[in-house]
Amino acid sequence: MSGYRLKADRHSLIDTTRPIDFQFAGRRLQGYEGDTLASALIASGVRTVARSYKLHRPRGVFTCGPEEPSAIIDIGLGADRTPVTRATDIELFDGLIADCGNAWPSVDLDFSAATAKFARFMPPGFYYKTFMWPNWHLFEPKVRNMAGLGVAPQGRDRDRYDEVSIDTDVLVIGGGASGVAAARAAAAAGAGTVLLESDKALGGWQRWATQQDTDSWREDLARAGVQVLVRTTAFGVYDHHFVTALEALSNGSDVRERVWKIRASHIVLATGAFERPMLFPDNDRPGVMLAGAVQRYASDYAAACGKRVLLAVNADSGYATAAALQRAGIAVAGIADARPAGSRGAHVAVPAGVPHWHDALVVGIEGKSSVRSAQLLAGGQVRSIDADTIACAGGFTPNVNLFSQAGGKLRWVDESAMFVPHGTPAGIAAVGACAGVFDEAAASMHAEESVRALLAGASIPAAPVGGVGTCLADTHPAPAALEKGARKGKIFVDLQSDVSSDDIRIAASENYRSVEHLKRYTATGMGTDQGKTSNINALVRLGAHTAREPAQVGTTKFRPPFKPITMGAIVGGRSGERYRPRRRLQAHTWHEQRGALFEEFGGWMRPAAYPREGENLEQAALREALAVRRGAGLFDGSPLGKIEVAGPDAAAFLDLMYVGTMSTLKPGHGRYGLLLNENGVIVDDGIVVRLSEQHFWVNTTSGGVERTAAAFDEWLQCEFVDMRVAVIPVTGQWANITVAGPLAWKLLQELGFPAEFAPSHMKHMTMQGTEIDGVPLRVLRASFCGELSYEINLPPSYAQELLDRLWEVGKQFDVTAYGVEALQILRTEKAYLHVGADTDGTTQPADVGFDRGIEKKAANFVGRRSLLRPASRDANRMQLVGMRPVDRRTRLPVGAQVAPAPLPCETEGWVTSSYFSPILGEPVALGMLRRGRSRTGERIRLHHMGAWLEAEVVETPFYDPAGERLNGA
């Protein structure tokens, strides 16, 4: 236990008058309001907080921000668990429960750490080369058990999430000195300005490193009209200056996280920079940290990371850190500068009384579970330095992730050993440390000039890169230096993925020269941190092994999100029923009162059936189907897709959309049509009715109305741009109550429908308008069950009233409410096509018997050319046919394969729809069969779940082949 609590001063973010109790790995600990979980663990003396991904080596807190690669832990329990999050990102709250998610039985004693003994057998890409014999499944359970960094939550996420969309003239990302200067300049120019800051306070490096008083910055910006969002991290920059950001709400808020979707005219990136680690043996040991993080924990959180700190530096910033730690009362064991003498800037002083060495390298660490001392090679001699913390100042890596996402290019600055922005995408400026400018005055001036240039539409001024001093690109000790160390430990490049410098060497020896290939082969930079602290060291080492400079090696492409975000935040509250809201019928209560069993069909909660006491779903559906055949039934078809297409070119447009010809329809008449995609594949079907010369009523399937309307719009906007057509989806504006059965007309007649709706006057596939008690109706005579049927379309608010009246009047006809399952039985008896059940992604009109008339149609239509391809005219295509079990008793299972031999083998077809027909007293089925229509009368064998079934290919429809019952016969 090396960490401890310092005395908090006025610059600290913690409030020591407000203690907070929390748990980590089963231990009860205490921190203060304002602490992060990481700072509270450090101040409590907890060093080992996690285990590494592959070798399960002990890991401690390494950074103080979103770049954290090691302190990856789980928060909460059960459904409230958030796995694989960074201890550096979590603000402490009372009752917080945290644990390592990939250690067993505990983080201090992890049995999986035994894998480290076999590390030599797990080089890069070993998972591509092993586990092949005798069978992968032999290894799978163990590998899955060990894989991952956390435990997935169990149960539904009970937290709430939110999202907000805004637009602004100028969006500034980053609340340090450069970002604040940019925001002030934008506001002064009269531009609407939004500033995002990931921390809970503005100031950045100026606040914690130089302890400037930045408390008033937020108020000053607010007075200037700048909208400031703290605890808000921009995680994605997309086309047209669209930015997404995640706001972590303070504890006690009703909302856990909020996603901001921001459209900005101009973007200023002031995202700062990350500190680079140093490379030396066992540099992953708890107690090895970034120097800036050690300083910030002392300044912001009054948490000392150790009792004696050795600075391993490759940049002038390490000397300032040593001085700051000394002022905080933390003993500094020395400064080991990897650079040669004379590299330190003239303005940089060595703190009084602190030993320092040049050309000095850490070549070993004592301490198995955490740092106890360091072996330092300086002046050709190895000496032991008593230190429990090694603070690494390896230089800086500008945080160019968002800049890269926006399409920006980078260039290598050799003196400072870093990539900086090279040019800027239109409307975007990089300022401050993000642009490689580390001098505060120069950075602020450049930020102001950049904003003025953005608003004026001028070129962004070149960034005055500098302020870091001289840094070595490669801090890896030479082999001769490593030989002098007493301990031979691994030198880690990527701490999260356990990628060592040897792994980089091996990958290079196997000719992985591209940094993108290296990333995927070794997993460097593929962790949750996206290589924020490892990428530069990795590409430098790749360059060393392939005789290339870093500029020649290049960088990987940064992709959103900048840091991991929860799935709940991405969904933004659209979870559970809100993910895909289940739509309810206007008459939902009416169906409930009659015992409806609801199921989801096409996003609608609809009655599958109305089981009576003692009935199951299948029994109820059989009873309902038989009742419709013998009397009258009521069906709520309100979800049926309804689109109105109107305009001078509406008829010609529908001819282009449908296989059938719609332009020849007379007003009041309808026609069935198939919709195809460009490949000639059936995607929807329905009835089109001509209401007037330029006005059509289009029915689609319940689940296909949205994509059909979207397809209509796409064709009009992208291809048929000169057509004068309006497409208006009206599914929600019309309910549909269907009255079907031989007694359907008698029921409507009793209700008061006029005589012109009698089947002797109103033909099948016609529509008439009327009113009942002032309620407008559109009545379509069409049938999906094969019986006399009236589809009554009316305003939804009257649907329940109409059902009540039909139910009351229908009692004398023994009227029955029937659900979707009964309808499926009825349409299968008639062999009516059900798109999506009887079709798949290859089915074309000829496959289901709708090729008649295509050759005669003069007009072109979507998919027509594809129907001329050889594959579309192949005589061996699957075709929809009727099937009956030979024994007339066994219902053929849907999905059963027509096969000459036990599976696996080439299939001859499959069953698509299958039901027991109550009116026929035997099972009936539809299926796809190769050359099906030429095989009528043939016996076929079906294979299903290890059993064989025999069936016969038969003519369809199974019931009423003459279609006489459509007129109430």
Image: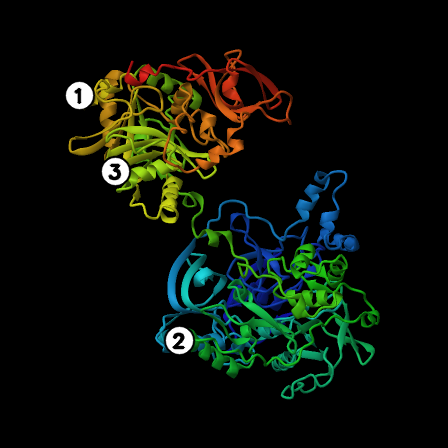
**Residue 764 horizontal side relative to residue 837, left or right:** left
Q: Which mark is residue 755?
A: 1
Q: Which mark is residue 16?
A: none
Q: Position of residue 892 (x, y in %)?
A: 52, 19
Q: Position of residue 718 (x, y in %)?
A: 39, 48
* Depth check, front residue: 316 or 454: 454
Q: Which residue is mark 2?
A: 456
Q: Earlier in the sequence, mark 3 or mark 1?
A: 3
Q: Which residue is mark 3?
A: 695
Above/below status of 940 relative to 14: above
Dot 2 and dot 1 residues touching (CB under 8 Å): no
Q: Position of residue 449 (x, y in %)?
A: 45, 79
* Depth check, front residue: 614 or 676: 676
Task: Report if residue 755 is visible in the image.
Answer: yes
> Quarter holding the N terminus?
bottom right
Name which residue type carries label 1. Answer: Ala
* Secondary element at tag 3: strand
Q: Give the CA separation, mark 3 to mark 2.
A: 51 Å
Name which residue type carries label 2. Answer: Ala
Mark 1 Cα-neighbour bin, 10 Å: few <14, some 14–19, many ≥20: few
> Quarter holding the C terminus?
top left
Name which residue type carries label 3. Answer: His
Q: Give the CA separation, mark 2 to mark 1.
A: 75 Å
